[in-house]
């Protein structure tokens, strides 16, 4: 049994982030929360999202799993205005999820989840921690486009820098500590990441969000942020590219 | 002889509706009105439009016919702002129509009308009558997209419903009588129509328009509405798709 | 040595105009101004632009030349908001130009200028002189689209006209002297120009600009206008098409 009501904005925020990595996803429903883990087909990036029942207007659920085609879900979300509520109701016998938005009913067949295994979330401790407004990252991404396929994230006790360097061209955004929301760094760290993955996730994080970037030399970067006024937690991992000399 | 002046918005409204069905059209000019009948190449939908001379700022005409290429007319209409007047003048000797918008002159060759026969408008009486704001229909169309090629229109004494049902998915918009501008129904009726045709006409009807939908089981639907503050009448017929079981 | 600071709007205005003709350009830097001459590959149109040091917020330069890839420059300009300042700094040893916009740094390799010769600017005196708001020209261009590949510019003591005439269709914009900002004409002159070139330059000239059009029968048209509140002067030449009868 799963029946819930959620503001369209909250559901849009979650769905747009997941759809940067996968086309289909398995939501794991618990009595007090909803969670999902997703990994892209190339195993470069991973998402681990937990949405508290408090992020919903109403929520009643037993343990269950729901597989969804995200393109279909996005087409339904387009029908909802910013303040609209969406009522979700799972019919486990028919393998369907019904969305209700005002006087619109949209019934959707579910995706088989039997072959969808939860990826193992890496347990890593990263000493460097940068808290930065997403708007800065979006600006840095814009500057980096078409210079290289990779972006370097660098931090030292004085600040944080995004840089993209090609054979002849360079773009960088340097944020001194005073432009950051927080900075914990014991020395200089720097790693290269694939620009397209980094760009895709940065572009869907809502303006104004403060993101927590944890990094270390040649380690995956861990990006944490909240949606739905803190009632949904997102953790995003992105594998580094090891520079060969 | 035909010389007339019309607000660009009025002419745009008419032209955009006709161009959902045909690329070229014959306007029949009368001393007191202008009319046109159009049927799409597949003979699935038909339009019957009458524009009173009162819809024009100025109007003086003898009986005549004018064949127009609607893509050319649309490119001219783009030159006119919302409040602009367009002066039309027919030169029958040269086979040309001249559009004047402010200090712009656009002279256009006419299309030969000798092979354009007026389609015969069906004389059908349909007992069920729904009056509904076009904005509701636009919302129902958005929900239906990509689920099926057909949309069912259903009415009963309690309300009106648009529904689109595929093998596994369903989208429906249910409007109770209280959300309608009028409802006359003696029992349940339901018919299937091609979604693309229905969508095309719904999308070009101006927001806020109340449309009068007359329907019956497996009959063509008849959609009536007014443009130009009631001075232009549009009747649109759309053939049903008979469900085979 | 070249180091300068300029408002992004001023630099955008210049770059968008030059990029209608060429992909790469040589800026010639003088102590008191910056200039460039560009001719399109087909040798149909030419630009001669002079930007006074007063158009810059700061400017210090020795004589030098800088070759730039305009697509790269346009991608940098997208990073700057309307009121932003852009700091330019030339590193002649490395063959690089650095753009700084706030905390963004964009270093760009330069294009080799050794094969870029300055085109010879034609010294022609054209008796007819029309001063007209660019907004009128934009409207005339819109009307002319898809009727013919050429546009005629005509002037006589009573006014100025843009006309585009195909085999059966015609579009024209007639501006009486009262709609012009100035008119010097001793008789009727008329010439045909390629519509795409004329359209490209007209579209990038900022709204509100008064342009000075000098023309004569079957001569190149010379279009002069100012950017940056008169601190940058642009001269554009466009070759006529001689009508064969």
Image (cartoon, coloured by chain):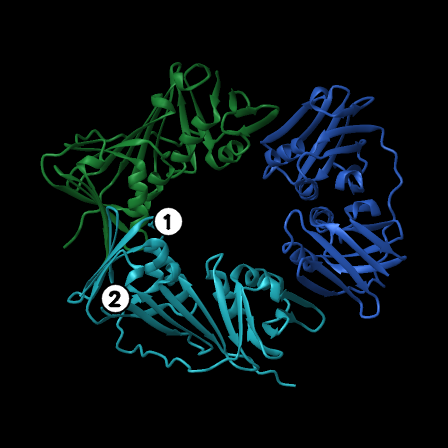
Chain colours: A cyan, B green, C blue
Toward the viewer: A48 or A23? A48
User: On the rendered structure, is A11 left or right of C117?
Assistant: left
User: On the rendered structure, is B188 left or right of A21?
Assistant: left
User: On the rendered structure, is B221 left or right of B99?
Assistant: left
Q: Quadrant of the C terminus of chain C?
A: top right
Q: Quadrant of residue C147?
A: top right
Q: Position of residue A187 (x, y in %)?
A: 62, 79
User: On the rendered structure, is A114 left or right of B3?
Assistant: left
Chain on which label 2 sits = A
Mark 2 or 1: in front is: 1
Inspect this view and state whether residue C113 appears: yes
Q: Around disc 2, counting alpha carbons within 10 Å, would you say few (fewer than 14), some (14 to 19), or many (20 or more)?
A: many
Chain on which label 1 sits = A
Q: Identify the disc placed on residue A82.
A: 1
Q: Which element carries disc 1, helix, strand or loop?
A: loop
Q: Position of residue C214 (x, y in %)?
A: 80, 32
Residue ID at (39%, 70%): A22
Toward the viewer: B197 or C217? B197
Toward the viewer: B189 or B178? B178
Toward the viewer: C6 or B150? C6
Residue ID at (81%, 23%): C185
Q: Position of residue A242 (x, y in %)?
A: 57, 83
Name the residue that disc number 2 marks.
A110
Residue ID at (76%, 38%): C229
Above or below C124: residue A164: below
Q: In whole angstroms, how far apart are the C-alphas of marks 2 and 1?
A: 25 Å
Q: Quadrant of the N terminus of chain C?
A: bottom right
* Lower position in the chain sequence, tag 2 or tag 1: 1
Above or below C201: residue B230: above
């Amino acid at each position: 049994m799963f029946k819930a009501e959620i503001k369209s904005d909250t559901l849009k925020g979650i769905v747009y982030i997941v759809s940067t990595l996968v086309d289909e996803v398995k939501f794991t429903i618990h009595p007090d929360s909803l969670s999902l883990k997703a990994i892209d087909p190339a195993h470069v990036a991973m998402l681990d999202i937990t949405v508290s029942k408090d992020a919903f207007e109403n929520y009643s659920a037993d343990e269950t799993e729901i597989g969804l085609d995200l393109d279909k879900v996005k087409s339904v979300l387009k029908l909802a205005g910013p303040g609209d509520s969406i009522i979700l109701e799972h019919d486990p016998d028919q393998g369907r999820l019904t969305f209700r938005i005002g006087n619109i009913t949209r019934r959707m067949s579910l995706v088989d989840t039997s072959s969808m295994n939860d990826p193992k979330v890496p347990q890593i401790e990263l000493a460097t921690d940068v808290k930065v407004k997403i708007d800065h990252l979006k600006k840095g991404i814009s500057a980096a486009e078409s210079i290289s396929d990779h972006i370097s994230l660098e931090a030292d006790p004085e600040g944080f820098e995004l840089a993209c360097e090609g054979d002849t061209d360079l773009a960088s955004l340097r944020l001194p500590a005073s432009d950051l929301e927080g900075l914990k760094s014991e020395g200089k760290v720097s790693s290269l990441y694939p620009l397209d993955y980094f760009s895709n996730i940065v572009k869907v994080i809502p303006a104004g969000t403060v993101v927590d970037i944890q990094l270390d030399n040649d380690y995956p970067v861990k990006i944490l942020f909240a949606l739905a006024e803190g009632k949904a937690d997102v953790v995003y991992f992105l594998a580094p590219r090891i520079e060969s000399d």
